Amino acid sequence: MAKLKSFIKIEGTLDDLTFYKGKEGYLVKTKSAISANRIKNDPAFIRTRENGAEFGHAATSGKQLRRAILNLLTDAKDDLVTPRLTQTMTRVKDADTTSPRGERNVATGLTTAAGRLTLNGFNFNVNAILSSVLLTDFTLNTATGEIDIPDFVPSQNLTSPEGATHVSLEAGFLNLDFATNVKDLQLSPIFNTPINNTLTPVVLTPAAVPAGAGNQLYFLKVAFFQEVNGIQYALNNGTYNALQLIDIL
């Protein structure tokens, strides 16, 4: 795959070249000389089939996670979150050291410390990394999903985008079984406060402990708003909102 650098923008197929528009601009790739039927059935391509199956599984696992937290994710993601999460899930899958090639999977990978470490700390918006947005410590109670920020002073402990007058914080507690896709997301009430110099302790307690036998995942979201005539409006459609997976068990 290569980028097309020309003032003429082409989409379609010309001889052995396919031109198309992707998120990174206009791209071009050559047609494969190997038929799909041969890749599917020829024993010489067994490694290719195994790799393809595992890549597809990693992509599906990323989709499972994104859909499970859609209520948090909608306004706190970047344009490349899907391929970034697929890449991360591929590394989680690689932590599965018991399944045969072609069948390694995320659910088994997450039973290992290495697999959980790979996914832990994932930021869903690279334009707003949580550690760069929230400049203070917080504690997490993994039994309840409660997040505490006792010494929160908004104007001092936030990197606020220009025009922001208010900030909202929200905690998410998810139980997700990647093998069965059974999921339960519990959210805390949204804590909204002006961005000022007032000491404002924050306690974010999810409504309940989510049910399920899968992994427990914990999220913290920071979202910015601008108040005009008493009404708060999302700032730049969430461009500066941060959402991070802060722990996984």
Image: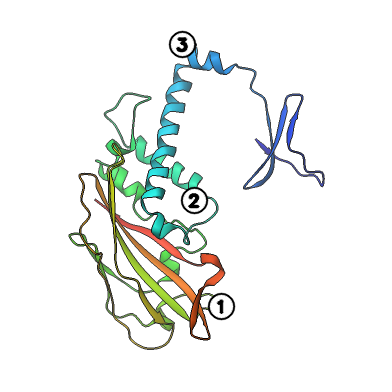
Amino acid type, label 2: Val
Secondary structure category for the residue under label 2: helix
Amino acid type, label 1: Glu
Return the x and y of residue 202 as percentages of the image width and height.
29, 77
Q: CA distance from mark 1 to mark 3?
A: 59 Å
Marks 3 and 2: in contact by CB < 8 Å? Answer: no
**Depth order, front residue of 86/65:** 65
Return the x and y of residue 13 as percentages of the image width and height.
73, 29
Examine the image and state in which quarter residue 4 appears: top right
- The residue drawn where x is 42% and y is 23% is 50
**Depth order, front residue of 157/196:** 196
Residue reaching furthest to the right: 7
Amino acid type, label 3: Pro
Image: 132 above or below 78: below
Q: CA distance from mark 1 to mark 2?
A: 24 Å
**Depth order, front residue of 119/26:** 26
The answer to whether 148 appears left or right of 226 in the picture is left
**Residue highlighted by disc 2:** 81
- The residue drawn where x is 52% and y is 56% is 78
Figure quadrant of the N terminus: top right
Q: CA distance from mark 2 to mark 3?
A: 35 Å
Examine the image and state in which quarter residue 228 appears: bottom right
> Pointer 1: residues within 10 angstroms few (<14), some, or many (20+)?
few
Secondary structure category for the residue under label 3: helix
Mark positioned earlier in the residue sequence (1 or 2): 2
- Mark sitting on residue 162: 1
The answer to whether 140 appears left or right of 194 in the picture is left
**Residue highlighted by disc 3:** 43
Return the x and y of residue 66 as percentages of the image width and height.
41, 49
- The residue drawn where x is 34% and y is 71% is 190
Marks 2, 3: nearer the viewer: 2
